[in-house]
Image (cartoon, helix red, strand yellow):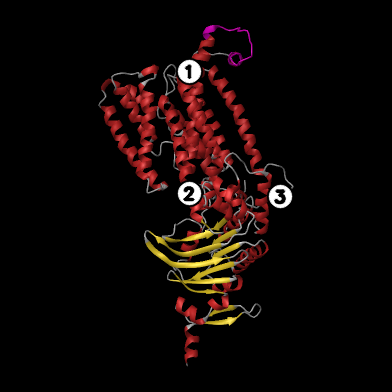
Amino acid sequence: MGRGKVKTSFDIRTGGLIYPHWRGRVLAIIGLLFLLILVVLFSTSIGSVEIPFSRTASILISKIPFIDITPSWDSTIETIVIDIRLPRVILAGLVGAALALAGATYQGLFRNPLADPYLIGVAQGAALGAVLGFLAPASKVGMGISLVPMLAFLGALLSVMIVYLLARVGRIVPVTTLILAGVALGALLGAIVAYLAITSGQLLHGIMFWLSGSFALSQWSEVIIVMPIIVSGTTVILLFSRMLNIMQLDEEQAQQLGLNVERLKIILLTVATMVTAAAVSFVGIIGFVGIITPHAVRLIWGPDYRFLLPLSLVCGAIFLIIADVAARTIIAPSEIPIGVITALCGAPFFLYLLRRRAKMLF
Amino acid sequence: MGRHSSFTFYAEGQKCYSEKDMIELKLKDITLGYRQKPVVRGINFEVKPGEMLGIVGANGCGKSTIIKAIARIIRPFSGSILLNGMDINQISKRDLSRLLGVVPQMPLLPSTFTAFEIVLMGRNPHLGLLQYESKKDMVVAWEAMEKTATQQLAERRIGQLSGGEIQSVVIARVLAQQTKSILLDEPTANLDIGRQIEILDLIKKLCENENLTVVIAIHELNLAAQYCDRMILVSEGRIHSQGEPHVVITEGNIKQVYGSSNCIVSHPLSGLPAVLPTTFNNTQEIEE
């Protein structure tokens, strides 16, 4: 892009409807959505039972309302695709999208490239909630809801709320104070989690499994709980993408351009935290997606949040679905923790981008 | 935010505060500062549409503080700031951003955005939550860049621009905001003399042609005297003198406020006062 010599200037009045820089980004969103569909098909075909690509496609299409395809396949294959693999793939996609979007939002809100969804205590709060859930005598609360994800969700929300209240000075919340309070509370909660985990005896394995993140136990019931939170939260954040752009100026300038900075902070913090909490509550703490995806998108397509947010969303979903396929197939029938995969694939790719286009980062 | 919702503001605004109207700014007995410590005391002045008011004074005298108060970044301890007779604290942030544009002293801009993207941000006050910039917004932004001669920078990233170019881009952003009053805090501080004159010419022209209300805090006494219709000389948080340039720029005033010897001459073309520095040697000669 605009490196080196100045390009010949354009004139918006005679040019097309779309500002030239934007055309490629719009196309990228559309292209990536198609790629996402392909990735879903591909990943539901792969596993201990190999199912041909075309068969998976027709099983999935037959489930779309109003489309009638007479099943020419074994019902066990349908069960594998629809009830075992598909919820796992969809959950991975939702979580990837949620973490990438929340990461991009936090980075924009804090104007800090090191921000990730776990920066202000979400992860440690969720972990503490989950550990308490493991240690509790009962494993279910009413209506068949498991205790661990529910406590993880509440723990995440509660810790961010405490951080917010601690950081508040009068009617404003300085960003730096917020980050510092988050890091401090996170350290405190992390210490408690570590102590509880070590002294938990035979529960330690389950706790460690949760803490490192896994999609192994995904079911439709989980998708049904997580999906509405993530979809609605995502919609709200996307609505504020233009204002996130303006937040990239300093807060004084943002205010002079008519932005209610404090209100924007509280709305976006709440929604991004909800989305992150929903993402981690069932599958545990999956690192790296939330910080690396937005940066990779930024390096390729630029910093404009109107494109950065949707592109991060789709890329996060694709990335985590593929990472999960790798996690469950490389040493099958055992599984590799997904965090290991995200770090192993993501880090080198990111370093490559960083070396090539370091100038464009933030 | 404000005590009046934007709805009531517009209901009243139909008559006298619509965006097309001119803006009259009035400061009434303002005392303000930081953390309960007053920096500026008992300031009174008013600016009419089509008028360019320069605030001058020594470093740290409170020029920027006054600008910040009008921009509603800091709240005065006492007194009121009125736009067309309405206290700015009762106008919502969004409505205020359609009435008053601000060019900050050292604007921090994200280095990876392009200049055009930054200028387009000036349209934010006119856009709702669900709106994207329309072609009309882009044309407004583009014309603002033409007026400030920054259109050849449109696709460059902010990180590649010089301090002066960034200053011009921010002025273009304020023009894209299409407000009827503009505050500028040291807009020429980073610029060479050619660029300084270019920018001030532009502001002066806009002020006269479009009846803008302009308040400018500025270090350069000579530039201030040439361009401003009226000046305010601030010293230690109080107004030392105010009025037309030849009233404010006098040897006595400059000596008292800046503590340096000087010599005031009349500009050969405009007849407006200009300050010449007098060095140690000159002073001795005069005394002898």
Name the image quarter holding residue A309: top right
* Residue B256 image point, x, y percent: 45, 79
Can see residue A340? no
Magenta stretch encompasses residue A68: yes
Name the image quarter holding residue A343: top left
Q: Nearer the viewer, mark 2 or mark 3?
A: 2
What residue is shown at x 36% (from left), y 35% (from top)?
A159
Check chain identity for marks 3 and 1: say if they share one.
Answer: yes
Numbered circle sitting on residue B3: 2
Q: CA distance from mark 3 to mark 1?
A: 52 Å
Numbered circle sitting on residue B9: none
Q: Dot 1 falls on which chain?
A: A
Q: Mark 3 or mark 1: which comes first in sequence?
A: 3
The answer to whether residue A160 is left or right of residue A30 is left
Residue A36 drawn above or below residue A256: above
Q: CA distance from mark 1 to mark 2?
A: 48 Å
Numbered circle sitting on residue A220: 1
Amino acid type at circle 2 is Arg
* Residue B68 image point, x, y percent: 48, 59
Check chain identity for marks 2 and 3: say if they share one.
Answer: no
In the picture of the structure, the residue carrying the numbered disc 3 is: A11
Label 1 secondary element: helix
Amino acid type at circle 1 is Trp
* Residue A289 image point, x, y percent: 47, 33
Q: Dot 3 falls on which chain?
A: A
Residue A150 drawn above or below residue B72: above
The answer to whether residue B61 is left or right of residue A190 is right
Viewer-side residue, B165 vs B286:
B286
Specify start and end residues of the magenta stretch as a single range. A58-76
